[in-house]
Image (cartoon, rainbow, N blue to C red):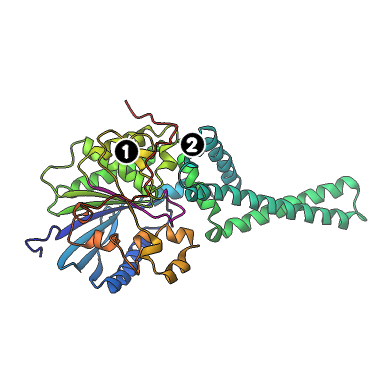
Amino acid sequence: MKTPDQQVGQRRVFYIPGYDPIHPRRYRELYRTEGRAQAAISGYDLTLRPKPRGETYGWRVTSQIEGGAVETEIDVLVWSDIVRDSMSNSIPATYGQLVQTAWTYISSGALGGLMKLRKGPVIAALYPVGMLLLQALVALFLAAGTGALALWLTGPVLPGIAQVFVACMVGVMIVGVVLRWFRKKDNKFYAYYLMHDYSYSARWKGANPPALEHRMAQFADLIAAALTSDVDEVLVVGHSSGAHLGVSILSDLHRSGRVPHNGPALSFLSLGQVVPMVSFLPAAERLRGDLTYLSRQDIPWIDVTAPGDGCAFALCDPVAVSGVAPPDQKWPLIVSAAFTQTLSPARWQELRWQFFRLHFQYLCAFDRPGDYDYFRITAGPMTLGTRFAGRKPSASRITRAVSKFTSVPT
């Protein structure tokens, strides 16, 4: 039961994952294990239990944090099926995506703008291109070697044309075998996964494909329903690519008048955002307009990144760097998770080269927690706005406009 001086006794959390083909149960297990670890470190109680089957996948949390008992229901807004449908299983198709994606970012000038921001996410974007090309070169090198060996072995028994034919066939076979081996090992290299991720936005030049727009409208309906319930806070969390989806979903909700003035507090937490990868593209008018719109509203928006996360545009104000910051911009508040300070030296040393794991650190336990604690935010007794009230933005934040494209819907 909520005490008289407690802001939140009941909360709904809507978590929007990034470009991820894996079933959302991974997020429940991550919350369970990391929440338990953070509770032990920080001295509070956190218990998970299943929620009834419904339109979304999720779980319930009972917590005792900062002297308040809180009941939280967490829903994952699933679009993993759309992600899986966008991921080609064909090796030639993936190399075709490589060419198309590289051309889109280079020819539009978006890559040039991104390179003026953080180096980490640009390197992460170039990584799958380099890795796939390296895999192709390895395959061709081995094919050339085995082809030459086939020529030498068949020399005494086959005429010249037949020798060349056999050598070519052997070479083609070797290329296929090597590339299929690399594809099978992509859970170690992540080249195909990242290529599909970047090509998803590049294919539409920053616009949302129809299937995704339809799913976003369904998400908005679920959040709108929660805003008419008797909970104290509705918190939307967008991680990675899910951050820019959250921007557009919340903008749509507010524009359509579905955010009641006397309803629950509505808050937005963006984590490890990669907004510029989309907003810098020529056809991203919808997203740029939503960035401008949401930045003006009375919806607390906290953007948390960390320079140690090489996959995110750390401390980059997504509104400002996209060149669409209005004069009356209120949000987001740019906060650093400061991995080198909130993780012990031993833990940081263990994780610092695990780039993809660090991109999920925002959802995990910190052994030296600062003012950012995912579990206090999602299951604690304060609203997001109150928790960060008076917090100054990171002194290292980047606010200069660098996007070549700044058009918004008229």
Please give the label number shown on residue 110.
2
Is residue 309 within the magenta segment? yes
Q: Given the image, on which type of amino acid does mark 1 rest?
A: Leu
Mark 1, other Cα within 10 Å: few <14 / some 14–19 / many ≥20: many
Mark yes or no: residue 217 visible.
no
Circle 2 SS class: helix
Q: Looking at the image, which is closer to me, 375 or 142?
A: 375
User: Which residue is drawn at the image coordinates 34% and 44% (left, top)?
Assistant: 245
- Residue 103 lies, in percent from the top left, at 56, 36
Q: Quadrant of residue 60?
A: bottom left
Please give the label number shown on residue 291.
1
> Of callouts 2 and 1, which one flags the residue occurring earlier in the amino acid sequence?
2
Q: Residue furthest front?
A: 395
Q: Quadrant of the C terminus?
A: top left
Q: Main secondary structure of the magenta part?
A: loop
Which segment is the magenta one?
A: 300-313
- Residue 51 lies, in percent from the top left, at 24, 62
Mark yes or no: residue 279 visible.
yes
- Residue 242 lies, in percent from the top left, at 36, 48
Q: Given the image, on which type of amino acid does mark 2 rest?
A: Ala
Note whether 10 is above or below 194 in the view shown. below
Q: Quadrant of the N terminus?
A: bottom left
User: Which residue is drawn at the image coordinates 30% and 63% (left, top)?
Assistant: 370
Left or right: 144 as drawn, with respect to 245: right
Q: Residue furthest top?
A: 410
Circle 1 SS class: helix
User: Which residue is drawn at the image coordinates 90% and 54% (left, top)?
Assistant: 155
